[in-house]
Image: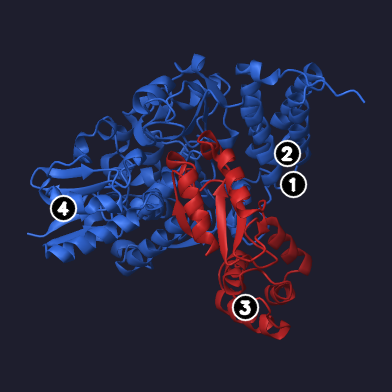
């Protein structure tokens, strides 16, 4: 029987040498005349073990990692095709604690299947959600999603079902589903992983959204920094179209739905939904004032659902298993699961899908294993460049939308960047302002001008120039930006700045520089 | 890459790209991506052609081209090295690594080495945040960079 060897094709695995490993394995199979094949799967999301190579044996899938091309020969020598022992041997993949502790709903197939095999997709419960949706009345699909408690996973946490209902009820002969795959936040990679590791789930989710709202066309707006995700998505759409999942008749039903991938052009602000819509229309990615809501006047002025990749990718399992199944996970008003991305200076970095409610400390210390450098954790930034910095003192905060808001933070797209004690928080605050200045669309004054003034003020504090006065000024500036900006870029940049000032005041009181006397 | 393109040639090639993509809803970004893929940058001469063909003002087209970081108005070196400058990479010594790369190449960000081999660009997040610091050399990704691997990377780029 042909032995199956899995070598991931995820961009992070490739960045760590997976391509060379796959080539070396293929060459070794040929050299030894073995009956084996290499499947390029997605990543399980355990990046400290990537490239993670797996072999399907009679005892299930056995993992080895991190594998480099130079290890391949010794793996064959050790009989890894039958799960033989080797220094890189990790045992059965599903028993690796980081994976075993997860609740994988959205990422159930990611890392398990060949991302571009429809056969694999169907075998692991793919398309059943769409099939069920087709048999339902569109209003019932919307109700199912509403009842599941699913909230926008892009960061705002707006109930997905309510957004869908607004679009479904809006008059219009042409409606759109726009998937926001402009995952620009540092520390996040869940969208990238699912697009590269299980693209059909996003296609299925978007088709369901189309049927539920009466939309017939969908766009996936992906950042240009993700060429691999764009290519995989494109290929998956072609396959889905060919198989009749997309097109004039979705799975033979009376519903039409088709998809297109669009690439951004390096503007962070296009992750904001109205800016994204302008960009999609071929304009500058300038933020639009709301109202009108995109749900009523979105892409080309027509009713448009704008949902994050994770929101849409969570829809198929909700339709498949039912609203109650999904709602039973989580805490408070945060229902279901969330793919937490643990990144930065962390020992076990990766994607950890779990129900809402773990404490920040559990995530960083127990799951992430502390810092990669071995030094103490000083701060973690949760929610990307616009998210707050949390000190150890707040590690008891449960991971859910409301608990983070109560501590002047946000979970955003659920990315966490860990910093050890060498980090200078004043420098991080300055970077937040600098990033905002680089990426501001320029429409509103607090964001456009405020960010530049923020950089200057932080610099003055760093140089010890009237630090007391400048700290007050910086806090005041943050207030202006927070309440006066049109969108989250200017409005949330104060989060990292203020949290850094509040929790790490010692970094904002540098020793005054004595000016040299002439 | 053909840097010295004659004006008439730019117009012809631009028109061909526009013809192919004009029917898309919101065609300007896909067209600009194609133009940059074709010429290596977005030539000034192509802008009036786009304005005319898409029924836009030249100011509108100029506004779009200059808004997005990706579109360049001049060619790059033979290789483009994009170094991630975002927080996750900072937490793993990205700033120090950037200084190292700049010193090895003898250039700052947005500059090209004198021999025309390498252009160095900052990039904000490649989604490789759990294997930082990260970089992209001509579309190929590199993670968990350290002094040794970055030296190799620079040497590869210089070739």
Work out whether mark 2 precedes mark 4 in sequence or the reverse, and give the earlier one: 4
- Give the chain ID for the blue colour: A
User: Residue B143 at x, y = what percent?
Assistant: 44, 47
Which of the numbered marks, if any, corresponds to residue A319?
none
Residue most extreme to the right: A518
Looking at the image, can residue A177 be seen?
A: no
What hue does chain B carry in this figure? red
| Contact between labelled residues 2 and 1, with CB atoms less than 8 Å apart | yes
| Contact between labelled residues 4 and 2, with CB atoms less than 8 Å apart | no
Task: Single out the mark in the foreground, 3 or 2.
Answer: 3
Work out whether mark 1 precedes mark 2 in sequence or the reverse, and give the earlier one: 1
Question: Mark 3, residues whose alpha carbon is within 10 Å: few (<14), some, or many (≥20)?
Answer: few
**Which SS class for mark 2?**
helix
* Callout 1 and callout 2 share a chain: yes
Asked whether, in this view, residue B27 is left or right of residue A80, the answer is right
Disc 4 designates what residue?
Answer: A76
Disc 1 designates what residue?
Answer: A442
Please report, as a chain letter, where disc 2 is located.
A
**Which SS class for mark 4?**
helix
Q: CA distance from mark 3 to mark 2?
A: 40 Å
Q: Residue at x 26, y 40 (%)?
A: A321
Q: Residue at x 75, y 32 (%)?
A: A454
Q: Quadrant of residue B112 in the image? A: bottom right
Q: CA distance from mark 2 to mark 4?
A: 57 Å
Query: Camera-side residue: A132 or A4?
Result: A4
**Which SS class for mark 3?**
loop
Disc 3 designates what residue?
Answer: B2
Work out whether mark 4 precedes mark 1 in sequence or the reverse, and give the earlier one: 4
**Which SS class for mark 1?**
loop
Quarter holding the C terminus of chain A?
A: top right
Please report, as a chain letter, where disc 3 is located.
B
């Amino acid at each position: 029987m042909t032995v199956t060897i899995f070598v991931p094709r995820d961009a992070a695995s490739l960045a760590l040498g997976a391509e060379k490993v796959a080539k070396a394995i293929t060459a070794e199979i040929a050299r030894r005349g073995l009956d084996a094949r290499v499947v390029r799967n997605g990543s399980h999301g355990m990046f400290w073990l990537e490239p993670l190579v797996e072999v399907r044996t009679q005892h299930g899938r056995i993992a080895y990692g991190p594998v480099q091309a130079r290890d391949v020969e010794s793996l064959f020598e050790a009989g890894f095709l039958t799960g033989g022992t080797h220094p890189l041997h990790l045992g059965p993949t599903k028993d690796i604690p980081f994976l075993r502790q997860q609740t994988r709903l959205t990422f159930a197939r990611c890392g398990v299947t060949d991302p571009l095999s429809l056969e694999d997709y169907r075998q692991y419960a793919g398309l059943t959600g769409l099939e069920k949706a087709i048999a339902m009345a569109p209003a019932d699909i919307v109700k199912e999603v509403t009842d599941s408690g699913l909230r926008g996973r892009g960061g705002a946490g707006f109930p997905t079902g309510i957004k869908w209902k607004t679009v479904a009820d809006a008059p219009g002969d042409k409606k759109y589903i726009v998937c926001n795959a402009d995952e620009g936040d540092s520390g996040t990679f869940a969208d990238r992983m699912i697009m590269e590791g299980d693209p059909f789930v996003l296609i299925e989710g978007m088709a369901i959204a189309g049927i539920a709202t009466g939309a017939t066309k969908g766009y996936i707006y992906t950042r240009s920094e993700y060429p691999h995700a764009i290519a995989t998505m494109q290929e998956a759409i072609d396959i889905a179209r060919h198989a009749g999942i997309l097109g004039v008749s979705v799975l033979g039903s009376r519903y039409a739905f088709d998809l297109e991938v669009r690439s951004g052009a390096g503007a962070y602000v296009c992750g904001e939904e109205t800016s994204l819509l302008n960009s999609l229309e071929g304009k500058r990615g300038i933020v639009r004032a709301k109202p009108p809501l995109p749900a009523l006047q979105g892409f080309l002025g027509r009713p448009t659902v704008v949902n994050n990749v994770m929101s849409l990718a969570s829809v198929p399992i909700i339709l498949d298993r039912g609203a109650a199944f999904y709602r039973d996970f989580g805490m408070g008003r945060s229902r279901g699961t969330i793919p937490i991305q643990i990144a930065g200076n962390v020992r076990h970095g990766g994607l950890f899908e779990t129900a809402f409610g773990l404490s920040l400390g559990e995530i960083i210390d127990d799951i992430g294993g502390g810092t990669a450098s071995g030094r103490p954790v000083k701060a973690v930034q949760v929610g990307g460049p616009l998210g707050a910095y949390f000190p150890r003192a707040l590690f008891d905060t449960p991971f859910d939308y409301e608990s983070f808001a109560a501590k002047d933070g946000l979970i955003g797209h659920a990315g966490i960047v860990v910093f050890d004690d060498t980090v200078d928080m004043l420098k991080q605050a300055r970077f937040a302002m600098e990033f905002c200045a680089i990426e501001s669309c320029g429409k509103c004054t607090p964001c456009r001008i405020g960010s530049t003034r923020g950089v200057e003020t932080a610099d003055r504090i760093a140089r010890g120039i009237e630090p007391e006065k400048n700290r007050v000024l910086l806090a005041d500036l943050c207030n202006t930006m927070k309440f006066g900006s049109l969108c989250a870029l200017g409005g949330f940049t104060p989060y990292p700045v203020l949290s850094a000032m509040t929790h790490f005041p010692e970094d904002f009181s540098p020793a005054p520089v004595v000016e040299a006397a002439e | 890459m053909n840097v010295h393109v004659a004006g008439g040639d730019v117009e012809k090639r631009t028109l061909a790209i526009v013809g192919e993509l004009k029917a898309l809803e919101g065609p300007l970004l896909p067209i600009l991506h194609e133009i940059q893929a074709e010429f290596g940058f977005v030539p000034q001469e192509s802008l009036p052609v786009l304005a005319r063909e898409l029924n836009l003002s030249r100011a509108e087209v100029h506004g779009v081209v200059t808004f997005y970081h990706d579109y360049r108005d001049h060619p790059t070196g033979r290789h483009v090295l994009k170094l991630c400058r975002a927080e996750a990479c900072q937490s793993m010594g990205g700033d120090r690594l950037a200084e190292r790369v700049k010193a090895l190449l003898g250039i700052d960000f947005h500059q090209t080495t004198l021999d025309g081999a390498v252009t160095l660009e900052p990039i904000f997040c490649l989604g490789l945040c759990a294997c930082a610091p990260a970089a992209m050399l001509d579309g190929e990704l590199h993670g968990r960079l350290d002094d040794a691997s970055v030296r190799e990377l620079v040497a590869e780029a210089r070739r």
